Amino acid sequence: MLRVGVAQINNSFRYDLNLRSIENAIEIHGRAKKSDLLLFPECAVTGYHTGIKEFDDRASQASVDAVRKRAKEYGLPVLLPTPRPTEEGKPFNSVLVINANGEITHEFGKIGLHRGEEKLFSSSPKHSRMIKLNGHKIGVLICIEASHDPWTYLSPEESPDVILWPGFYGMPPKQTWADSHEVDELKIKQNFSAWNAPVIQ
């Protein structure tokens, strides 16, 4: 069994407030000892906003270092979405995989950017989006990528046991998947059948 904790933090435009929320979530899940992996939302370190155009790499790296330290303190692997610097100037919209020793083992960059994102981010080169934890194969998609053809970013040969999907898709509290026409139009529900795996956001 793989137990995935989901930290649905309130993202702000301030690095310090976001870091405080991230560290608190790691502490809560770490003390409870009920999660094998903790998932955060897209751009958890910076918040998702147009100010990413003035991306502060030093502040971002300081936050990442603090999260790595906290993950090691509690022995809790973390999936941490955060922009990462590039030579082109615009950052990658990325996800860092931090293990129980506080080490970054994988860095996944978002490839499938929507039109608005292209003003903020560079598209990452194509790469494998699979990790293994406790004998489980875990696929990682980032936000709008889950609406593209199901095997664009994941390999059917690797056949993930679960897909983690950090993003900003959401619905009002009383709305369900069955009620959501918008998500249907994005073909995400249809993709679930193709993947034949649970999807966790």
Image (cartoon, rainbow, N blue to C red):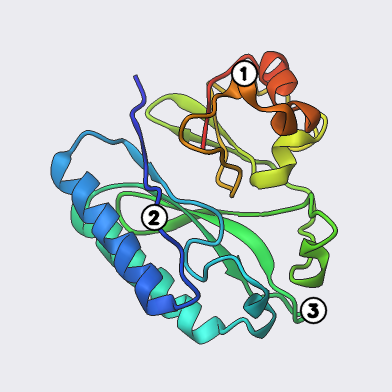
Precedes in sequence: disc 1 or disc 2: 2
| Mark 3 residue type | Glu
Mark 3 burial class by Cα count in 10 Å: few <14, some 14-19, many 20+: few
Residue 198 placed where, x, y %? 53, 21
Q: Label 2, secondary structure: give it.
A: loop
**66 sits left or right of 150 in the view:** left
Residue 145 placed where, x, y %? 73, 42
Residue 9: assigned label? 2
Residue 186: assigned label? none
Q: Label 1, secondary structure: give it.
A: helix
Q: Which of 2 and 200 is in front in this view?
A: 200
Precedes in sequence: disc 1 or disc 3: 3
Q: Is 146 located above or below residue 80 in the figure?
A: above
Mark 2 burial class by Cα count in 10 Å: few <14, some 14-19, many 20+: some
Residue 14 placed where, x, y %? 45, 78
Residue 178: assigned label? 1
Q: Mark 3 points at which residue?
A: 88
| Mark 2 residue type | Ile
